[in-house]
Image (cartoon, rainbow, N blue to C red):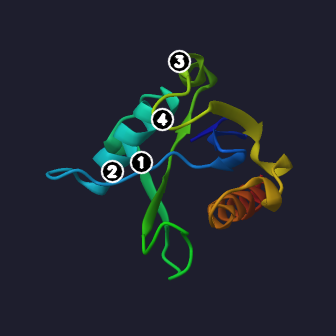
Amino acid sequence: VVDREGKLASVDARGKLVMPGGHIEPGETPEVAAARELREEAGIEVDPAKLHFLMDLDAGDRDPRGRYVSHVYGIGVPDSVFESARAGSDAEAVVLRDFHTIRPEEIGFDHWQAILLLQNRRMATDADR
């Protein structure tokens, strides 16, 4: 979730910034699951139909808990969406940061790849202006 100013919503999980996420429940689409996890972990409400697919994170050794594949979705939102942000579930805090200032060593798992993709897309968009 990125606002118009380029702030990224992530959650602090044991001292590392990670994208909100979790398992797909029976009967859910990946988009509905992504929106639910965002609500549960960060208190941010989004319309699942407005999420757009960014990438899959699927390296075999990407998660120390076992073999997992993450479907990464994005959505741009107005600043006001972050007013309801609050840590929930297994998150310690919701962190709002300009995604250009986030360093790889601050990121958990392989979520840095998604941030790098967003940074590259933002730079390409800015260059087109």
**Is 39 placed above or below 111 here?**
above
| Residue 35 in picture, x, y percent from top left | 38, 40
Amino acid type indicated by mark 2? Glu
**Can you identify the residue that label 4 sits on?**
41
Q: Are marks 2 and 3 in contact (CB under 8 Å)?
A: no
Task: Say whether residue 88 is left or right of residue 27.
Answer: right
Which-is-in-front pick, marks 4 and 2?
A: 4
Name the disc covering residue 51, or none: 1
**Mark sitting earlier along the chain (1/4):** 4
Which quarter of the picture shows residue 23?
bottom left
| x 32%, y 47%: residue | 33
Q: Are marks 2 and 1 in contact (CB under 8 Å)?
A: yes
Cα–Cα span, label 1 and label 4: 17 Å
Amino acid type indicated by mark 4? Glu
**Is 21 placed above or below 67 here?**
above
Cα–Cα span, label 2 and label 3: 20 Å
**Mark sitting earlier along the chain (3/1):** 1
Amino acid type indicated by mark 1? Leu
| x 35%, y 38%: residue | 36
- Packing grade of label 2 (10 A; few <14, some 14-19, many >=20) is many
**Mark sitting earlier along the chain (2/3):** 2
**Can you identify the residue that label 3 sits on?**
84
Q: Secondary structure at mark 3?
A: helix
